[in-house]
Image (cartoon, rainbow, N blue to C red):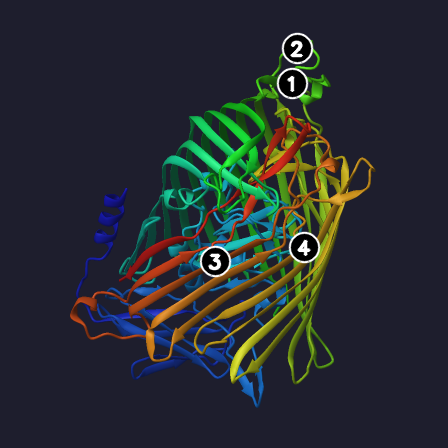
Amino acid sequence: MKNIIFLLFLALTFSTFAQKARVKGVILDEFNNAVENVNVNVGDKGTVSDKNGFYIIEIEANKRITIVFSHLSLKKTSINLSLKPNEDFELNPVMNSKVEEFGEVTVFGNSKKRIEGVTTIDPVIIRKIPGANAGIENIIKTLPGFNSNNELSTSYAVRGGNYDENLVYVNEIEVYRPFLIRSGQQEGLSFTNTDMVYNVDASAGGFQAKYGDKLASVLDITYRNPKQFGASIEASLLGGSLTVEGVSKNQKWSNITGVRYRDNSLLVNSQETETNFRPTFFDAQTLLNYNASTKWNFSFLGNISQNRYNYQPLTRQTNFGTIDEPIALLVFYEGQEKDKYLTFFGAGKAVYQYNERNKLKFLLSGYHTQEQEYYDILAQYRLGEVDANIGSETFGDVVFSRGIGSQLNHARNDLDALIVNAEMKGFHEINDKSQIEWGAKFTLEDIRDRIVEWEVVDSTGFSLPNPDLNYQNDQPYNPYVGPLAPYQNIRATNFTKINRFSGYAQWNFRGTLGTHEYWLNAGVRAHQWQVTAVGRPDGVSQITFSPRAQFAIKPDWNRDMMFRISGGLYHQPPFYRELRDEEGVVQTNVKAQESFHLVLSNDYSFKMWSRPFKLVSEAYYKNITDVNTYTIDNVRIRYRANNNATAYAYGFDARLNGEFVPGTESWFSFGYLKTEENQDGRGFIARPTDQRLKFGILFQDYMPNIPNLKLYLNLVYNTGLPGGAPSYVEDSYAYQMRLNDYRRADVGFSYVFKDESIKSTKSWLKPFNEFSLGFEIFNLFNNQNAITNTWVRDVYTKSQYGIPNYMTTRVFNIKLIARL
């Protein structure tokens, strides 16, 4: 594949000899409006765009030139290119609003993202900020409303939702997470390759109708369309990546391709469980663009990933309890786990620009995953009291056993899923103030799934029966006469197909109220689906309608403020995992969860220390019906598939970002959340994602006397989640304890030999645009953070202990970055 792409680019880059070429096009602002009186200059030659934004300029062929676009109220834009003789090249630049200063007030352009309440993240920050699982998910966990207490996982919860309630798009194509993931250390790589990213937008609620049917959030990612040749390489103790990009001479073809490899053993070996761990996480992605004409553009996004997770636990010791009464769990393991995930993803997109005001998009994508989860692990444990006498020879050892037992876990789980999407979108600008967007989509989901899981628990030599059998085992005092049965036993085979039709229409309008500007977005989504499963009654055809609206107003004040109100109905028709109940059986008539959102926002841009800052604050409320309740074990969600609850969530989020250090962006975020559910009318209890308080800090700094030395800090504090019931327990009301607070600080130090701001005269650095060497410390303060509990019985008291499963300890890493 690499050779084919290389030969293709080589064929397209042959030079010919002549003198002149022409560049023409239409200049637009960020609202897709034509811009008049833009100065277009190439050296001492120039022209001006007309009232329709059109321009044409003649340039020298076979020579790399720079075209500069400038305007009194817009940011200057420059583009480098080289054309063939007599070539006509269409270039339609988009010019953004510039910052204008009036005394002590900084007025930012009213960009589309600001109006929609979308948070935009700079890809450069994403690549620089350290984290155990560095990438986009690592950064958004510092944003208000986005929560996670698992540094190994790319999953996150937003404002009371769970990991399955978040939309993720790459180049307008929805992407999916693996189905059979049980723990963060199995995930390996996020789908998104950060070295290929151009733009990242995140919304934590109240998003527009054009986005899909999920309850919680949207992450909208755009990959880079290369303008010239470039390459980058990153290498660390956790793996590495290589990215290459290029463009043809006539600017019609461009490609960016990235290859990544990751090894989590450095992090997993820092956990309390001693293991033999041999993971291999690998993927390759490519984005190919072709500008066929001034009206047609074609692109293809492809991804292949293969993850192998081989895990052999050996021993574990967890100390808990109190200072006066310390308790320890000692575990000795036999057996191993072998998991495989093979994924193929391909998506094609065609964009037809009929004219300046009308655009159509055609999208076709396919996702195929084959997943295997096999394990046989025997855990033999001792639960005992620890000798706390400092002068004792047995200090720190278990001197008295409260419980002795073992458990054998077995699984043979296989899943094969094929998901195909066909979609059409339209954008129509009625006039300078009004636009209409619409879309229609068909989705076919074909999933084949086999679940075989069982667990045998033995306490002091006596097998514990399945709690659902309601048999009592109090040997040796009374003989046990019940049947011998595994403590848990799940066996199911599902062949499931889901056909979906969905669509949306929305209207955007910009107007004025006196001297105040306002923006209105109103739309509606519709979704129809039907589930068929072999051996089960066919599901009924179900349909939902989701009206949504946003209103933003910018008062004509001296202070640069914007106010927004957004909300509406949000439905989440069940995906495959939400159809599967606790016994692994697909329920074909599970309803869509329904949530009413109301979000009130204030966006305040100001100047402090003569530098730009922004404070965004939001209050939100959600009322959720037809709730599909679930339990969480690590990152694995097991649904009850019965729509038997109602729920609510409310809270407040705030983020202050700006140049705390000149030339760098940092932010501080805060969030308060309360979410509860009422199952079968029994009263409200905390939901598994009820994370009350959240603080996040992303900070960049450098030493004034040594500007080459940079510092990056990523700090998150979350109050504890509900500890959660064991996955087999039906009654969540009996397990409402909470885990300890989650405290995480990752810091990175980077010595930059060369980049855009730091120049170097050293000869060996001439080929590089950027070269840096970094040192990272994960979990700087070595905090013990727990992801969930292991439940162990005490034979004497007949009670169960929730023993924390701790995450990674302090880890050191070295990272090299080089870009051409």
Q: Residue at x 19, y 68 (%)?
A: 18
Amino acid under disc 3: Phe
Q: Which numbered circle lies on residue 692?
A: 4
Amino acid type, callout 4: Arg
Mark sitting on residue 465: 1
Q: Compare marks 3 and 1 and give the one earlier in the sequence.
A: 1
- The residue identified by callout 3 is 781
Q: Amino acid at mark 2?
A: Pro
Q: Residue furthest bottom?
A: 103
Q: Does the residue at mark 1 contact the one at mark 2 (Cβ under 8 Å)? A: yes
Front one among 742 and 369: 742
- Determine contact: label 3, label 2, CB under 8 Å: no
Left or right position of 102 against 706: right
Q: Secondary structure at mark 3?
A: loop
From the top left corner, tell me how far across and down residue 493 is, in percent. 56, 20
Marks 1 and 2, how far apart at CA: 8 Å
Q: Residue 118 vs residue 470: left or right?
A: left
